[in-house]
Amino acid sequence: MEDFPSLDIDTPALLIDLDVVERNLDRMQKKAESAGASLRPHVKAHKIPELARLQIQMGAKGITASKVSEAEVMADAGIDDIFIANQVVAEKKIRRLAALSRKTDISVGLDSRDGAKILSEMFSAEKETIDYLIEIDSGLARCGVKPGRPAVELFKSIEHLPSLRFRGIFTHAGQVYGSTNLGEVKAISRLESETMLRTERCFEDIHVHPDVVSVGSTPTMRVWEGCVSVNEIRPGNYIFLDAIQIALGVAKPQECALTVLATVTSRPASGRAVIDAGSKVFALDKGAHGKETTRGFGIVLGRKAVVDRLSEEHGILALDTDEKLKINQRVRIIPNHACTVINLFDKAYAIRRGRVDQELKIAARGTVQ
Ligand SMILES: Cc1ncc(COP(=O)(O)O)c(C=O)c1O
């Protein structure tokens, strides 16, 4: 991997290697297809409509979003099948959801009777109908009802509500980010799917057949072996991968498509170099979902160096004694968590074979509402 010294762009800058992106998308698309499942990538990982469109061109069924505002940006860019894998309960947001449902195919997560009631009331008032999927907690202990009968009980308590249409069940086994070895990742991947199989069977006991049984995170899907009941997968980070995925054992550096290009601004001591990218570029994540998975704040490509510390505008590299980085030399760094880094930039440079192919606006950055 090169440091792209010839690129005429200022630093710090975000680079997206399009060849690597296409390989990552192709691999996951093929995995979904061979397991008989649709791919519905989570776009919070890239927040770029052009990349969402590429995912769909390559075979994805639609996209997953985490917020109404993220979905709005994607719908404005012409994406017409969006699942918001989250609870939408505030009246203001439900009104926006209803507006979205008039122009695009939209579905939403749900995990409570109270949440269902407010959705139903407001969609009835708007004379619209919304598709929903019940969220199942497969071990992350975030949102979601318990698998099996509790999920069926929730369904039975809301099935009579007007303006809601049951589409299926979904889960995200994000606890995988706390794994310490590949064996644990594989076990959580199996657990994620088996939890849904068990829950689907409970629905079948009452003669209800969920159209969609949806699972997914990047680590659990990178090692996934398929499951009879699962017919949709929702990884997001797989498009770029990052140092956390490498630490979990599910990715290699050459598979990481997103890098930060930075410049050495100071060599104040032997064994120490300072770059122009700090926590306002890399964020402080050392793992996802509050777990600590990585050493340092990113992987410096082709150099015997680690990103040891961050201030807001400075990254402090710890260098091996024979590493000869000089002032004004550039380094490329795989960030720990691509999803948070993408949200910190207005644009990224899409690169092909060492040249800028296009500038991509990160149109959905900051869409937290
Ligand atoms: C509900 C849901 N689905 C899918 C994903 C995608 O997982 P990953 O970021 O591991 O690709 C996430 C990520 O947080 C999520 O919260």
Image (tube, rainbow, N blue to C red):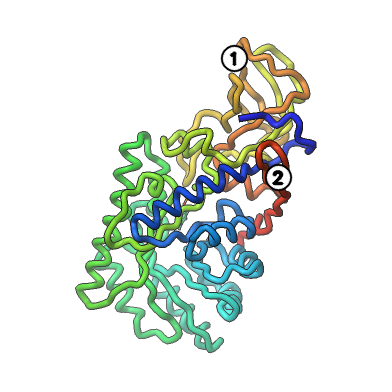
Q: Position of residue 6 (x, y in %)?
A: 76, 31
Q: Is residue 342 left or right of residue 289?
A: right
Q: CA distance from mark 2 to mark 1?
A: 30 Å
Residue 2 has which mark?
none
Q: Position of residue 158 (x, y in %)?
A: 36, 79
Numbered disc 2: secondary structure: strand
Q: Is residue 164 left or right of residue 265?
A: left
For mark 1, does the 10 Å Cα neighbourhood hold few (<14), some (14 to 19), or many (20 or more) residues? some
Residue 320 has which mark?
1
Query: Residue type at mark 2?
Result: Tyr
Q: Residue at x 62, y 17 (%)?
A: 319
**Residue occupying the far front of the picture:** 353
Q: Is residue 312 left or right of residue 111?
A: right
Q: How many marks?
A: 2
Q: Nearer the viewer, residue 121 or 73?
A: 73
Q: Residue at x 56, y 63 (%)?
A: 67
Q: Position of residue 34 (x, y in %)?
A: 35, 55
Q: Quadrant of residue 276?
A: top right
Q: Quadrant of residue 330?
A: top right
Query: Residue type at mark 1?
Result: Asp
Q: Against 253, is 47 above or below?
A: below
Q: Quadrant of the N terminus?
A: top right
Q: Against 344, is 58 above or below?
A: below
Q: Nearer the viewer, residue 74 or 314?
A: 74
Q: Residue at x 59, y 19 (%)?
A: 304
Can you see residue 292?
A: no
Numbered disc 1: secondary structure: loop
Q: Nearer the viewer, residue 5 or 319?
A: 5
Q: Position of residue 102 (x, y in %)?
A: 58, 81
Q: In terms of sequence position, does the residue under pointer 2 or pointer 1 come before the other?
A: 1
Q: Residue at x 52, y 85 (%)?
A: 128
Name the residue tied to disc 2: 349
